[in-house]
Amino acid sequence: MEQVSDELLQQFSTTTDSFLQQHISTAQLEAAFTPLRTSTRTALWPLMESKIKARENTDLQVHIEDTLLHCHLLPLQCFSEYFEREVQPGQSVVKLPAAQVPPEAFQIVYEWMLDPNRQLEWKHFVGVLSAAEFLRVPALVERCWQHLDNPKVVENVAFYVFLQARHYQRGQLQPMMLRRICRFFLALVSTLEFCELSLGELSVLLASNLIGVFDETDVFYAACQWLMYDWTERQEALGTVMELVRFELMHTAELGRFCVFKECAELQPILRHPTTKQLVDTALASICLRPTASSVADGGGEWFAHQRHQLPTERVRLVADTKETLAYVAGDTSYDGFNEFLNVLREKPTIWQTFQLSPENVGMLEDMFAGCCTVTE
């Protein structure tokens, strides 16, 4: 067919305009072509959403180590600053580091973008947080931290999150979780995972006021447990570890036993170390200088109040009220007795959940953890 000339097209347009002006109005045309009924056509977005969720016509390949994931770029760009700013137009392949973005976690992140109610599985939770931070998905990072603010993320759950965070070197998350151990502390000491903590991790744990103990000797024996697990490598850290123990909170009888080395042979290298001896001597001297009740009554109350502020902060105290805990508190207070109690905790790994807190600690922990640490499960 021959091409219509420009002159013919111009003539046709002029004729049409003339007809419109002489024989019909635009109002008539608008009325004639206004639909009598609303359209029954399916809306565009549900169709697009369905195809995106079904991974139809994907335009991006995401490579994470040996894993290949087919995705649509547009949803990723809507939520991720990384994809918005660092993926070039027309780029069809993106490689991500598995150390920060594990394949399973990326899959969850992508599915969350398509469905905001997508559950974040506990198995990959820290991986999802790591991926969300690397990909700069602020809404998902915020949601992850909302989960971590849940008062149920304490004790054994907190330690599980800590173990996950280790894989991704989450510097902020690891100490936060170690400070939430509370009643789980002694049960944790009975595990291999405790003995394999690094010096830095142990320091965070033993420096916490929120670890639950029956007496400060529990902390001392826990420190000894960690040191002797690998004595050859760890003996150089003895001074640092012993300074984490609050000897001044111990009973005089316990300090006296340590002072004259009346403890099992296994602990002699620790008890006879200059740092331990000095800390024990200082604690005994401090206790001896404390005024008696009669001296306080005779006017030493102001001095006593000042000195009390100088004492180390108390830990969270546990109350012995079960057969096992009463036997532990009333029994052998030596390192051997401590190890016997650890064996009980290994044989009954959930018994720590029955540990009750002293009344003065309950209010503080309820404020911090909404009472989740105080409920017998």
Image (cartoon, rainbow, N blue to C red):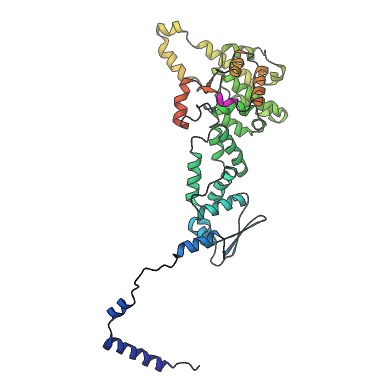
Q: Nearer the viewer, residue 141 or 274?
A: 141
> Does residue 255 appear in this view?
no
At x 47%, y 61%, the residue is: 46
Vertical side of 359 occupied by 50: above or below: below
Q: What's the residue at 41%, 7% (across, down)? A: 297
Quarter placement of the C terminus: top right
- The magenta-colored residue range is 348-354
Q: 57 and 97: which one is in front? A: 57
Q: Is residue 350 left or right of residue 85?
A: right
Left or right position of 56 against 273: left
Residue nearest the observer in this picture, 320 or 126: 320
| Percent x, y of residue 87 | 55, 61
State the image coordinates of residue 10 (x, y, percent, origin top left).
38, 91
From the top left corner, tell me how far across and down residue 168 is, in percent. 60, 44
Residue 352 is a magenta residue: yes
Magenta stretch encompasses residue 315: no
Of the pair 184 and 84, the residue shown nearer to us = 184
Q: Is residue 315 above or below residue 102?
A: above
